[in-house]
Image (cartoon, rainbow, N blue to C red):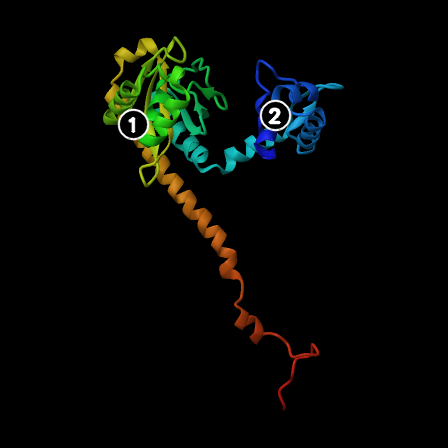
Amino acid sequence: MSSLKRLLAVLDLFTEAAPQWTPEEIAERLGLSRPTGYRYVRELVAAGLLFRASASRYTLGPRIIELDYQIRRVDPVSRAGQAAMSDLAERTGCSVTLAAIYGDRILTLHLEQGAEALDISYGRGRPLPLFRGTPSRTLLAFLPRGRQRQLFERHREEAAAIGRDWEAFQAELQAIRRAGYGVSVGELDPHNAGIAVPVLDDDGQVLGSLCLVLPRQRLEFVNVERLVSLAREAAARMTHLIRHDAADARAASEAPARAQPSARSRAAHRAPRGGIARQRPR
């Protein structure tokens, strides 16, 4: 394991259940020598990623809050999601969540409350169950088959929530993919239901899932197909915004290069040796 992975493993130790650690505890948990554990803690404190809460105990540092602010401002998926989700929540009255996958985790990137503020356990920044709930299942359904198989093999016990063997697992995800959306009732919060659609890029690769959350007793009275249609419109709008965000970023990065004069132009305007420009004869 590289030093970078070990440093990230230190940050992963800090959870709601275990918010503070000593360098000795960190070293013991990760199988490090004590000097290495202390060195990692010093480096993370210097970077602002850890903060000394008491004489010997540390917690997550304020740099993480700064990074959270930055990602809200610059991440194209989050930026596009905020714009599209606000409108979707207003049009449907539902709360809306946006989830994305990284590694073996699915994370809520943004939550937009609807007309009725719901109690939603998996708000921004909290990892979702990998195989439970329609935000996760819908996202998984649109992953490449090889990636699905990889997640199934790594997490067979948890994957049983979808299917106990690979064939059953695949059949369930294929059904969601054919329908183009997923529905679940009470899987994440017993009082809520969810209707999720994928967010795709221009190449059809899944970027995340957009989920309408509503009280479960309301589900039988709503037009699900209409909600799915509105959610798909919002997802398509996100794809459009992400495309334009990428084009703007590309143009901004190319602009300084275009503004630089060419080597020939610079040579033409360079003064003769000696630093004094030659004057024309009168």
Q: Which mark is residue 230?
A: 1
The amino acid type, in three-letter code, at marker 2 is Val
Q: CA distance from mark 1 to mark 2?
A: 42 Å
Residue nearest the viewer, comparing 45 with 27: 27
Q: Could you tell me which quadrant the C terminus lies in? A: bottom right
The residue at the point 46 percent across, 47 percent down is 249
Q: Splitting the image into 4 quarters, where does residue 162 fall?
A: top left
Circle 2 crowding by C-alpha within 10 Å: few under 14, some 14–19, many from 20 = many
Residue 116 to residue 241: above or below = above
Residue 27 position in % (x across, y down): 66, 22
Q: Nearer the viewer, residue 61 or 147?
A: 147
Disc 1: CA contacts within 10 A as few (<14), some (14-19) or many (>=20): some
Q: Tell me: residue 177, above or below residue 254.
A: above
Which residue ends up furthest to the right in the rendered image? 55
Task: Name the outermost residue toward the bottom.
Answer: 282
Give the residue number, with chain letter if any, for mark 2: 10
- Classify residue 186 by image quadrant: top left
Residue 272 numbered tag: none
Quadrant in which the N terminus is drawn: top right
What amino acid type should be assigned to the residue bearing mark 1? Answer: Leu
